[in-house]
Amino acid sequence: MRLHEYPVPRLSAQIIQEWAPELAARYGCTVEAFSDKPNHTIFFPSQTLRIELMDGSAADFKYAFALVSEARRTIAVFTEHCGHHVFPHCETKVFCDGAQVYTQSTHQGDWSSP
């Protein structure tokens, strides 16, 4: 049985592929170099990441980091053990070890527009 047959690894691999340009920029390499060995390139810091969403929901992840894309209107969270996830960035706050590192406090435009 292949690992990518399960939903979490399969979706995590998809998120890595979709976010390869941002991940490559984070690690200072080309998209091609990153895509050749993404599992060997990603470093998961020893920190706790907290995402607080506009409806009051929150999620905490250990050994994780976030990438914010205003263009995608999305925050991607990459975790060492719990898969990778995407969240809307509208009115979202990101904290690392309790310190706020990002906030998107105003709704910018109609989400239904491209």
Image (spheres, rainbow, N blue to C red):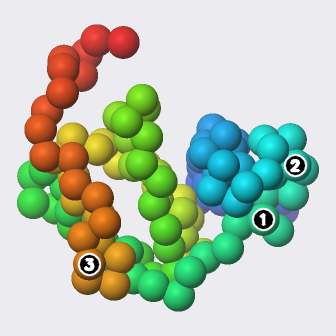
Q: Which mark is residue 99?
A: 3
Circle 3: residue type: Ala
SS under mark 2: helix
Q: Residue at x 24, y 70 (%)?
A: 100
Quarter of image, res 28: bottom right
Image-based side of 17 in relation to 56, left or right: right
Quarter of image, res 49: bottom left
Q: Are marks 2 and 1 in contact (CB under 8 Å)?
A: yes
Q: Are marks 3 and 1 in contact (CB under 8 Å)?
A: no
Q: Residue at x 67, y 40 (%)?
A: 21
What residue is shown with label 2?
Answer: 33
Indicate the position of residue 33 as horizontal and vertical percent values. 87, 49
Circle 2: residue type: Ala
Q: Is residue 38 visible?
A: yes
Viewer-side residue, 67 vs 62: 67
Mark found first going from the N terminus, 3 or 1: 1
In this rendering, the label closer to the viewer, 3 or 1: 3
Q: Is residue 32 above or below residue 84?
A: above
Q: Quadrant of the C terminus?
A: top left
What residue is shown with label 1?
Answer: 41
At label 1, counting other C-alpha atoms closer than 10 Å, the crowd grade (few under 14, some 14-19, many 20 or more) is some
Spatial CA distance of label 2 from label 3 is 32 Å
Circle 1: residue type: Thr
Image-based side of 93 in relation to 22, left or right: left
Q: Is residue 61 above or below residue 94?
A: below
Q: Quadrant of the N terminus?
A: bottom right
Indicate the position of residue 113 as horizontal and vertical percent values. 28, 12
Indicate the position of residue 22 as horizontal and vertical percent values. 60, 45
Spatial CA distance of label 3 from label 1 is 26 Å
Spatial CA distance of label 2 from label 1 is 9 Å
